[in-house]
Amino acid sequence: MKTISNFNEIMTNIQTLDRYLYSQVDPEYDFALNLIKRGTCFVAAKDSDTYRFYPSRFIGYTDNSMDVHLNNDTKDGKETNPAISKILGGKPLSDPALNQEYAKYCEALGFAPRDKGTFGTERKFWVIENNN
């Protein structure tokens, strides 16, 4: 899989995940929820005073979709995180306030967030303004 190389590719993947979430049609809906449940590094998109969260392992590959992601046996945050960092101009950071926003987002989606990300690590975030 090819990693993203520009901001438009990030937005394309965000729109794909949003479509899965808003449609609430399985298996895409369940797939999107599970990505958000298990994620560690997220692009946090701010819309006015709320945030939505997009996992880097999905967002970081060009033209990603559920089928492509599930068939990508080599997907790895060690590939996607540097690609996202290069585009957004910085590494993801731990942020207690954003972690609370993540918890609110999870609750709005109907599930309780785990205390930590995958492998018990702290969640980290990049922040973008989402002007959809």
Image (cartoon, rainbow, N blue to C red):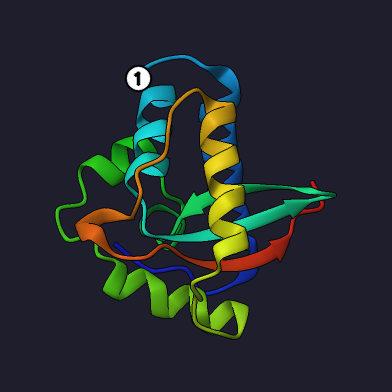
Q: Can residue 16 be seen in this view?
A: no
Q: Is residue 82 above or below residue 18?
A: below
Image position of 113 (left or right of 9): left
Q: Which residue lies furthest to the right in this view?
A: 48
Residue depicted at x 44% and y 77%:
83
The x, y position of residue 79, in whole percent, is 31, 74
What's under tag 1, amino acid-wise?
Answer: Pro
Judging by the rendered image, the residue that carries numbered circle 1 is 27
Q: Position of residue 77 (x, y in %)?
A: 30, 67
Seen at 30% across and 36% down, the residue is: 67
Locate residue 119, reporting x and y percent: 20, 59
- In the displayed structure, does residue 6 sit left or right of residue 49? left
Query: How many labels were placed on the picture?
Result: 1
Q: Nearer the viewer, residue 11 or 104?
A: 104
- Residue drawn at x 49%, y 72% is 94
In the rendered image, the residue lying farthest to the left is: 73
